């Protein structure tokens, strides 16, 4: 059970598939990886690991960095060895990619939480369909549930005014949705014209997509857009 704070929502969970009933710690391990340990276990059992191969000479000098835009990076000097943005859960942040590698078939998808306070993966998955790379799909237990419009061309850019019809004024800030077709990768990403504007996309437990805007004056997340099914 995870307690959500509406003002500081959880956007990523390392051990969503192996939740702890006791106290844990998030740290760097002796092999250079980022890990979650069960500190109530006598052996400090590893519950989760970034699980990458780090050269023996570098195991003691890797660092973990939480970036301002929400990406957790495991670094060796200036090189990023692993990052949480490559392993999204139910939240799509500015700068993330939902992607399909057309050569290997590897996908980077969103997966809904089981419930509001349970981050374990459950029924719904949002990603790019390997059979129709020009569309974004939602699957419910592996069956197609919803699909977006068809994107055509090497790169499709769409700009949206954040003010919207019902949203409070945001001084003309816009967000940009980009659907890109590279030689080996198709991906969907988005950005914001004003970096001080806080946006996040949530794929909720009912399979619904929501775009939320942070309102400083009321300290609340405003649902600016919702895909209704």
Image (cartoon, grey):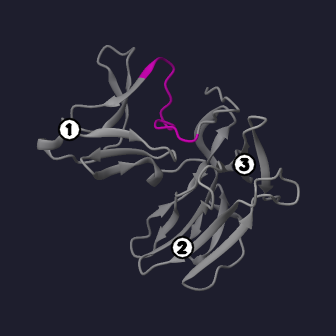
Pick out the residue farthest to the bottom.
Answer: 153
Q: What residue range appears in magenta? A: 11-24
Front disc: 3 or 2 = 3
Query: Cα distance, mark 3 to mark 2?
Result: 31 Å
Residue at image mark 3: 213
Magenta-colored stretch includes residue 118: no
Q: Is residue 51 left or right of residue 217?
A: left
Residue 19: x %, y % from top left: 50, 29
Pick out the residue farthest to the front.
Answer: 171
Query: Cα distance, mark 1 to mark 3?
Result: 38 Å
Magenta-colored stretch includes residue 19: yes
Query: Cα distance, mark 1 to mark 2?
Result: 39 Å
Residue 188 sits above or below residue 26 on the image: below
Dot 2: what SS? loop
Residue at image mark 1: 61
Q: Is residue 207 left or right of residue 10?
A: right
Q: Quadrant of residue 178?
A: bottom right
Q: Earlier in the sequence, mark 1 or mark 3?
A: 1
Dot 3: what SS? strand
Residue at image mark 2: 130
Q: Earlier in the sequence, mark 1 or mark 2?
A: 1
């Amino acid at each position: 059970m995870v307690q959500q704070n509406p003002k500081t929502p959880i956007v990523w969970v390392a051990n969503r598939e192996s939740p702890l009933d006791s106290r844990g710690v998030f740290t760097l391990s002796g092999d250079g990886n980022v890990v979650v340990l069960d500190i109530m276990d006598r052996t400090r059992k590893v519950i989760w690991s970034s699980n990458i191969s780090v050269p023996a000479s570098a195991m003691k000098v890797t660092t973990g960095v939480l970036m301002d835009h929400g990406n957790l990076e495991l670094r060796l000097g200036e090189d990023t060895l692993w990052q949480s943005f490559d392993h999204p859960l139910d939240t799509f942040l500015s700068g993330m990619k939902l992607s399909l590698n057309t050569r290997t078939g590897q996908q980077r998808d969103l997966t809904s939480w089981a419930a509001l306070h349970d981050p374990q993966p459950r029924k719904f998955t949002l990603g790019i369909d390997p059979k129709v790379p020009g569309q974004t799909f939602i699957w419910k237990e592996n069956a197609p549930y919803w699909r977006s419009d068809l994107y055509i061309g090497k790169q499709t850019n769409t700009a949206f005014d954040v003010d919207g019809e019902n949203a409070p004024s945001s001084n003309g800030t816009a967000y940009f949705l980009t659907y890109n077709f590279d030689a080996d990768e198709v991906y969907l990403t988005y950005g914001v014209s004003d970096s001080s504007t806080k946006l996040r996309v949530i794929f909720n437990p009912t399979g619904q997509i929501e775009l939320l805007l942070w309102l400083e004056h009321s300290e609340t997340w405003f649902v600016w857009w919702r895909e209704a099914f």
